[in-house]
Amino acid sequence: MLVEDDADIRAIVAATLRKWQYDVFELTAFEDVKREFEARRPHLILLDINLPVYDGFYWCRQIRGVSNVPIIFLSSRGGNMDIVMAIHMGGDDFVQKPFELEILVAKVNALLRRNYTYQEESLQLVHRGLRLNLSNSSVDYEGRTAELSRNEFIVLGVLMRKAGTIVSRDDLMQALWRDDQFIDDNTLTVNVNRLRRKIAELGLDGFIATRKGMGYIAE
């Protein structure tokens, strides 16, 4: 989530991060940053200090009351007290304007890797903003959640672990076998269609595509 009131800087930073395949939510109204955070649940926040209404320090404190999400402060204020204040308020890093985009991207990559590399593999899978929660067999997208059956959960897990790669129907059917109980072709089709419907109802269309004669792919 990018919280920056300078439209030019916001556009440049967002475009750069999208080139690195990040999903970027650009905040353009700053009256309630905490509410936007709770609605979006981003993996990282880029937070300007000088903001309308309340400053970035205030919003950092508010967010820290409900989350340990990584926060990088962006600011033209680069005095020692500003940096110390940013860290004391719960910030994880501080980037002074003007900054090199390559440095900002490197800091974003490092923070995400440090905070999520192991946790996401053990607790959730994420692709195109869709989050599969491995601990409770649910899937969520932009604040909306759907519960999955065992078979739906297995199919989606296989597809998301191999996102961008075609998975054959045979591989999916083998993943669905339980206690040597054979899963037929029709069962797989039914589960894929249910998954597509549930994901579409969350607001994400075209997540699972068919590759005729080959299988399915999470695009």
Image (cartoon, rainbow, N blue to C red):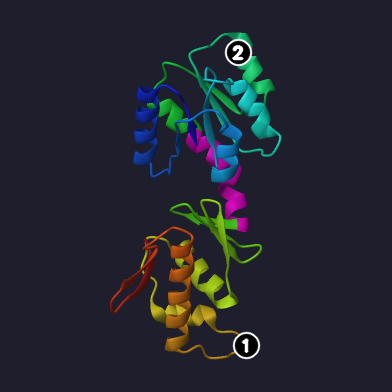
**Left or right: residue 8 compared with residue 129:** left
Tell me how many marks there are: 2
Residue at the disc numbered 2: 82
Residue 39: in magenta span: no
- At mark 1, the secondary structure is loop
Please provide the residue range marked out in magenta. Answer: 108-123
Residue 213 x %, y %:
29, 79
Q: Is residue 134 left or right of residue 107?
A: right
Residue at 65% x, 64% y is 136
Indicate whether residue 114 is drawn in magenta.
yes
Foreground label between 1 and 2: 2
The residue closer to the viewer here, 80 or 49, is 49
Q: Where the C terminus falls, by quadrant?
A: bottom left
Instruction: Give residue 44's position: percent from left, percent from top.
Output: 54, 38
User: Tag 2, which secondary structure?
Assistant: helix
Q: Which residue is mark 1?
A: 179
Of 178 and 44, which appears nearest the observer? Answer: 44
Q: Residue furthest right?
A: 65
Viewer-nearest residue: 203 or 134: 203
